[in-house]
Amino acid sequence: MPPATRPIDYVVAFHSKDAATRDYAMMALSAYGRDGLWDEVAERLVKTLKNRKRRGLAPLSEVVVKIVYLVRHAANESGRLARLGASLRQHWAGLEPASGGHDNEQWIKDYWSEASPGGPPVNTLGPPNVSAMER
């Protein structure tokens, strides 16, 4: 196939050196992607949340897109939902919106309130409504 007609490989794009390419790949993977990147996406989410205060970035889409991908594939392996819930609680401060940014914390409370600090133990978290999250 000529390069212009080849399908886009979102996994390759996810590993691109170009930040915009990685962001677009993450959006596509969140909506349509396969499960194979769960651990990497979980690590990137934690990095995003840890660096949030320092950078003042990470708009709703960057955080939420990663969370949607992770919850879509959480049931494919035991312990994933608990791991995601624990990461969110541990780095909850990184969810605060940047000046003029989206309220990631409120988004989680709206769509997966159990994952909020003070919720049930992470090993008992129920899955969120992924369809509602995707909308």
Image (cartoon, rainbow, N blue to C red):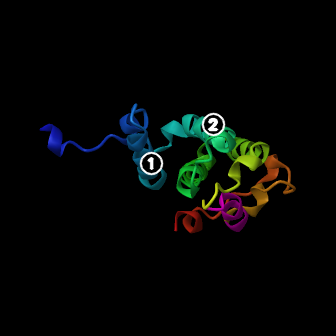
Of labels 2 and 1, earlier in sequence is 1
State the predominant SS element of the stretch in magenta.
helix
**Can you tell which quarter of the image residue 6 is in?**
top left
Q: Amino acid at mark 1?
A: Leu
Q: Quadrant of residue 60?
A: bottom right
Q: Callout 2 environment at 10 Å: few (<14), some (14 to 19), or many (20+)?
A: few
**Which residue: 42% across, 32% down?**
15
Query: Any mark on residue 74, and which?
Result: none
Contact between labelled residues 1 and 2, with CB atoms less than 8 Å apart: no
Say what amino acid the circle numbered 2 marks.
Lys
Looking at the picture, does residue 39 appear above or below residue 100? above
Q: Where does residue 113 sit, x and y in percent of width and height?
A: 75, 63
Q: Which residues are magenta?
A: 102-110
Q: Position of residue 89 (x, y in %)?
A: 78, 47
Judge the density around disc 1: few (<14), some (14-19), many (≥20) Cα neighbours within 10 Å: many
Residue at the (85%, 55%) spot, across then down: 120
Task: Decide: is 114 above or below 38.
Answer: below
Q: Secondary structure at mark 2?
A: helix
In the rendered image, is residue 113 in sight? yes
Instruction: State the image coordinates of residue 66 (x, y, percent, origin top left).
Output: 56, 48
Q: Nearer the viewer, residue 87 or 77?
A: 87
Residue in view at x 78 percent, y 56 percent:
116
Q: Is residue 80 magenta?
A: no
Relative to the observer, which residue lies in front, 38 or 92? 92
Residue underneath mark 2: 47
- Give the farthest residue toward the left: 2
* Label of residue 29 in the image: 1
Specify the quadrant that holds the N terminus: top left
Look at discs 2 and 1 and give the one toward the viewer: 2
Which x, y percent locates residue 135?
Answer: 52, 68
